[in-house]
Image (spheres, rainbow, N blue to C red):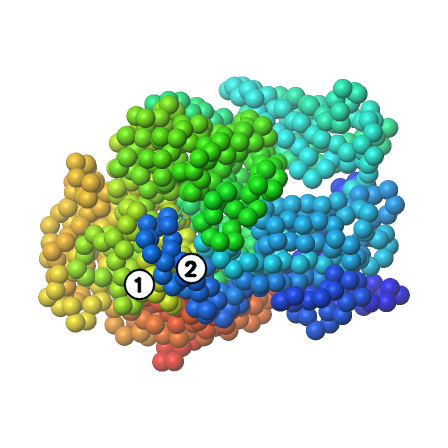
Amino acid sequence: MPSSLTIKSYCKTTLLCALTVLTIVTARAQSRKEYLLQKGWKFSKDEQEGAQANGYNDAKWESVTVPHDWAIAGPFSGNNDIQKVKIEQNGEKEASVKSGRTGGLPFVGIGWYRLKFKVPEFSAGKKASLIFDGAMSHARLFINGKEIGSWPYGYNSFHFDITSALKAGQENMLAVRLENLPQSSRWYPGAGIYRNVHLLVTNATHIPVWGSYVTTPVIEKDFAKVAIKTNVETGDQAFKPLKMVTIIKDPQGKTVSENTSTLTETDQLAFAQNLVVKNPQLWSPETPVLYTAVSKLYDDGREVDEYSTSFGIRSIKLEPGKGFFLNGQVRKFKGVCNHHDLGPLGAAVNTAALRRQLTILKDMGCDAIRTTHNMPAPELVKLCDEMGFMMMVEPFDEWKTPKVKNGYSLLFDEWAEKDMMNMIHRDRNHPSVIMWSIGNEVPDQSKKDGNKIAKWLQNICHREDPTRPVTAGMDRLDDVLKNNFASLLDIPGFNYKPARYDEANGKLPQGFILGTETASTVSSRGVYKFPVEFFKDKQYDDNQSSSYDFEACPWSQVPDDEFVKQDDLGFVIGEFVWTGFDYLGEPTPYDSKWPSHSSYFGIIDLAGLPKDRFYLYRSHWNPDKTTLHVLPHWTWPGREGQVTPVFCYTNSPSAELFINGKSMGKQTKNKKDNQTRYRLMWKDVKYEPGTIKVVAYDDNGKAVGEETVKTAGKPHHIELVTDRTSIDADGNDLAFVTAKVCDAAGNLCPDATNLLNFKVTGAGSFNAIANGDAANLQSFQAPMMNAFSGMLVAVINSKESKGQIQVTASAKGLKNGMIAITAK
Ligand code: GAL
């Protein structure tokens, strides 16, 4: 690219405009400038000899934007991740051939990215750093042909000083080589630069990446002490008597506290400022109040940097026998575990998609997320701060002893401490982060010296962040009770052990226990199987599981089994259900039965549509909202006269079922019986087409609500519903449009599998599609898919122009569905 080109024409083809005009995310006075490197990337799969060199010809490479997941385009194939393997933690005794364990997508292999860019703000005496929020995986970075660093763990954020490799006033080349090894994961990891990349330009004297640490050591009703440690760098690291002025702004932007400090030699380039906030507004899931600390750094009277840290004021405490306290109030975690993928969007991070997930979880009454089994995207942590979710941030699924052949065990010795440090330094100012986990079901639980590794990792957490407790998800209960592994943790966390909480608590010193992973009930949205019985590892010919929520794995339970223990045992401090959302990979109970390639564990399916179980959790977890949900659907041609149980999930104590106006009796929740404590069930009713109605009653027998389900007629039209009618015209925002196949009267046709085609015109474009069927091999990226249980979801992207977006769904023999979305 000749440098003599005018800026205008250069902008059309490369990134200069992205750097200079479009994507400066922060530009503070004369000090720091931060750029989001999203546009202008070139990408090629497979090894490309010499691709790090500036002169390499990448003209034939694909043009992509970052975040980018190279594997989500598919195609799905059982050969992409075929392996003969024994999954030990599932209790398997023999190896069997498995496909779809990691999503059936082509994530294995090498990928190269190249980006040409100019940094107008970079000149002699400036510093430049590259920050990767995550790159999958084994990243090697090159600037102008020179290797400037590598970071193998694909989930972690990392940063490198690129000052010496960067050319001022000239074009630069960033090349990134990634490589995903086969058998390196137990789920779909994604592939590529799937999280954001930032370029930071500062003065030589500046506050480094993740340079502040804010704690709130004293919180009283009328004041809180805020302690802010801020590191500084001076280029050659020589001491300078720098000055820092820090203000704290309240959520309304009003300055509520201020401190000015000057470094003395003994401070060693680290400021320690103590401020006071009067009448602090406390952060909690219900009141996610955020303050901001803004620090200005002065060198010899000249402002050289400005750094903002968002934080919250909240206290956490654990007490034996009493449990977990947030701001002095006992509460139990109503949490879910989530993998990082976003269903049809793959691993490529998107704020709108994350926000939609959290909005759905909030409605369910969920207040906590465990980021299984790896570091979250920074966007998720920020949203949890803002929307009010407590987080357990977890780095690892294995330590020294492998679960998969080429997993983290290959890296552990060299990288574990560095990975922990980055995780903690990046996220320790977030009020949403309540605890660290040091690992999930690591086989080292049972190994000699496993407890020493646990102690070492916990110590790293305590050293880098003394304000948060540490847990681990343990499954080998007998071993960890004997070998001290469980007793040394701040919080003993158990996976799938409600039946043994009492015993474990009796043998442990802490006085409380957490359900780090619970339930693992399996179901397919809108699919019901007969007879309705409790099953473990049940398989059906159609690769689906029943939504009566009675099916689990040999090691896992139905939700009710965990609820009972959570409610009855005061020392149990909450649960994290496996999982909130379905995810790509781990298609238990069909691990060995292609084409299944995504999970059945989700309370919500891969398309983001709630399964029936959602309402069971909502009825129990969200006291602020009325839940009255009835299942199954009532369109069963051929089942006339056959037993077709009806269940009701409600927060009312009792309800009456009517079939075509005839009462089937009243059911009342029974605290003494685990099966009927949380759900109302009419197990003997026989199917006849028509209308089923449940009427809910309060404690006084007064009718407080009713819900009706009707037998549907033939598919007639498509109804479209969008999660948001107005989205940002920024090219990143998304609307999720649910399509329902309905009969003439507007009833959902629960068996409909019509092929729906989407057309998007105006100020938006089609992005992705999913129907939640774990065995569906249709592409997520073609604007057509068969409905599953009558529904699917299309993801619509904004462009960078304002206006109306028209979405039309059509199908043979059905009336079109249409909806308009505004891009603002
Ligand atoms: C657990 C494991 C999770 C997931 C789950 C499925 O043992 O920690 O990652 O595999 O089982 O039930």
User: In the rendered image, which quarter is residue 584 located in?
Assistant: bottom left
Q: Nearer the viewer, residue 748 or 823?
A: 748
Q: Which residue is mark 1?
A: 544
Q: Nearer the viewer, residue 183 or 232?
A: 183
Estimate the spatial distance between the alpha carbons at disc 2 and disc 1, rounded to whole Å.
16 Å
Q: Nearer the viewer, residue 707 or 273?
A: 273
Side of 106 relative to 576 (left or right): right
| Mark closer to the observer (2, 1) | 2
Residue at left offset 28%, top offset 46% = 557
User: In the rendered image, which quarter is residue 22 located in?
Assistant: bottom right
**Residue 608 in the image: x percent, y percent?**
42, 57
Task: Count residues near mark 2 (Cα–Cα under 10 Å), then give few for <14, some for 14-19, many for 20+.
Answer: many
Side of 204 relative to 227 (left or right): right
**Residue 733 in the image: x percent, y percent?**
57, 57
Q: Quadrant of the C terminus?
A: bottom right
Side of 675 relative to 760 (left or right): left
- Return the disc, 2 or 1, that comes first in the chain's sequence: 2
Q: Is residue 394 visible?
A: yes
Q: Which mark is residue 710?
A: none
Mark 1 residue's CB less than 8 Å from ligand 1 = no
Q: With respect to residue 313, does 415 lie above or below? A: below
Q: Residue furthest bottom?
A: 813
**Residue 171 in the image: x percent, y percent?**
82, 59
User: In the rendered image, which quarter is residue 611 located in?
Assistant: bottom left
Amino acid at circle 1:
Gln
Q: Which residue is mark 2?
A: 101
